[in-house]
């Protein structure tokens, strides 16, 4: 077989992407012994697990927007939450991976939530099935595969709500059957342990949903020609994690299985970013890579090959529920965070502030943060000792600062032109103009 026929034969017949909320790397296969995740542990054993995978933002919508477009949040327009009154969403001219794969001949279907736009018709899905709980989403996808007995390539995007707070969403019970693994940045209190038990129950439910979906893929005869990618939007919904550019906030599980391509049980330690996923899909199907993509394909890493690796990943926060602009560069050893407004870590996403662990950490979180934070991740993995003002770190600070500035310039970051107003502010100004006109 040669030419177009050979290229088509090598393309994945199914691309299945499963994304969880607020998971970080809290899975058995990432060394958490007390959480029950047999389906994802098996997926990792059958495919590739990345140990240094990161998202582009510690907030839900911006991270998912980068995952969907291969472009950073400040480039694709989604710099804050895409729900309720916040008003952020993908810019109209941006292309979601669903539209690119539909153009390439894939039938595209979304199962569960989406969190990047108020205009679902812009995304490029042939059909959308918006069930909420993991078991409902999995059952619906299984029915879809039973009903759709055809050879057309499929792009199936699954977005679970779990394990977003509240952890008892859908009636989930806490799970401490194997004990509790407390993240090292949380205080060891009964309140923290109770929260982690709730988290473990929600993660276990998400894992069951993954298992049901993978079983349905097998039953439909599609598993052996399927590229399955599992990831999450950002770190755990805990203080010093979600909503911050600390590693705990931007770390993301990344597991990929593609039979015949990914060596079973392969572990990759290279730096990768979720902005790299779209280029990887496009290379996998033999499609050209658009010039405006800002990520890079890691297909060679999936194959077990040596490949020029990233020496850094970049992440950002502009808005979550309030304006908190900051950017960071993260290498294998060092992290530099540049802040653009005075703030502290006490102002966290509301779901975290309502949690039981938060009150015990307010004094620590309320400490003033400097505009620059530099960390040695080998010596200080919890990022507690800021080296930015230490003379012996001047060369590292200068190098990382230059690279961060150059990245912001290359990607036309609007922060370089001054403060960024939110869509909510624009609507408020419009309302103000209406007073006295009636």
Image: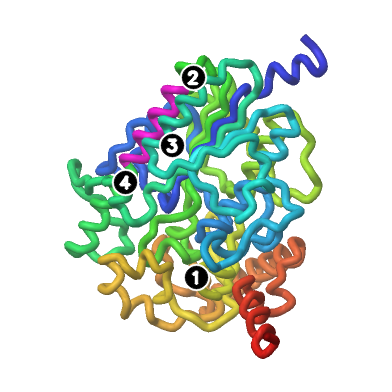
User: Would residue 243 appear left or right of 90 to someone viewing this image?
Assistant: left
Which comes sooner in the sequence, label 1 or label 4?
4
Residue 170 circle label? 4
> What residue is drawn where x is 30% and y is 65%?
355
Q: Quadrant of residue 315?
A: bottom right
The stretch of residues the image draws in magenta is 204-216
- Taking the spot 74% from the left edge, 48% from the top edge, the residue there is 293
Q: In the image, 177: left or right of 141? A: left
Q: Which residue is mark 2?
A: 146
Tag 1 secondary structure: loop
Most frequent secondary structure within the magenta stretch: helix
Between discs 3 and 4, the one toward the N terminus:
3
Which mark is nearer the camera, 1 or 2? 2
Specify whether residue 113 is in view: yes
Identity of the residue furthest to the top in this view? 1
Q: Tell me the tag on residue 321.
A: 1
Between the residue at mark 3 and the residue at mark 1, the CA separation in whole angstroms equals 28 Å
């Amino acid at each position: 077989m040669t030419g177009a026929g050979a290229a088509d034969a090598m393309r994945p017949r199914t691309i299945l992407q499963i994304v969880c909320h607020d998971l970080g790397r809290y899975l058995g296969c990432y060394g958490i012994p007390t959480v029950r995740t047999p389906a994802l542990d098996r997926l990792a054993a059958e495919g590739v697990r990345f140990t240094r995978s990161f998202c582009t933002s510690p907030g839900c919508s911006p991270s998912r927007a980068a995952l969907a477009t291969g472009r950073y949040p400040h480039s694709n327009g989604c710099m804050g939450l895409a729900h309720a009154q916040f008003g952020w969403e993908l810019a109209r001219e941006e292309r979601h991976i669903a539209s690119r794969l539909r153009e390439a001949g894939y039938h595209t279907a979304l199962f569960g939530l989406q969190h990047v736009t108020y205009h679902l018709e812009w995304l490029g899905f042939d059909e959308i099935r918006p069930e909420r709980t993991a078991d409902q989403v999995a059952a619906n996808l299984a029915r879809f595969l039973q009903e759709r007995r055809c050879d057309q390539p499929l792009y199936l995007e699954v977005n679970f709500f779990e394990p977003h707070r509240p952890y008892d969403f859908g009636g989930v019970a806490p799970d401490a059957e194997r004990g509790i693994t407390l993240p090292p940045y949380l205080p060891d209190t009964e309140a923290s342990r109770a929260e982690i038990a709730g988290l473990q129950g929600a993660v276990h439910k998400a894992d069951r949903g993954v298992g049901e979906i993978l079983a349905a893929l097998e039953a439909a005869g599609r598993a052996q020609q399927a590229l399955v990618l599992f990831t999450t939007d950002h770190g755990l919904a805990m203080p010093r994690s979600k909503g911050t550019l600390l590693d705990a906030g931007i770390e993301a599980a990344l597991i990929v299985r593609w039979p015949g391509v990914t060596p079973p049980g392969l572990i990759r330690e290279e730096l990768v970013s979720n902005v790299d996923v779209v280029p990887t899909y496009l290379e996998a199907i033999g499609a050209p890579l658009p010039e405006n993509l800002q990520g890079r394909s890691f297909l060679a890493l999936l194959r077990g090959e040596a490949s020029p690796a990233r020496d850094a990943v970049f992440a950002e926060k502009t808005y979550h529920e309030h304006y908190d602009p900051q950017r960071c560069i993260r290498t294998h050893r060092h992290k530099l965070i540049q802040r653009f407004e005075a703030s502290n870590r006490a102002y966290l996403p509301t779901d975290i502030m309502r949690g039981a662990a938060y009150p015990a950490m307010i004094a620590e979180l309320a400490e003033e943060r400097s505009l620059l934070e530099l960390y040695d991740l080998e010596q200080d993995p919890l990022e507690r000792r800021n080296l930015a003002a230490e003379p012996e770190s001047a060369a590292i600070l200068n190098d990382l600062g230059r690279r961060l500035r150059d990245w912001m310039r290359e990607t036309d970051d609007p922060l370089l032109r001054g403060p960024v107003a939110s869509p909510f502010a624009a609507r408020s100004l419009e309302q103000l103009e209406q007073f006295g006109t009636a």
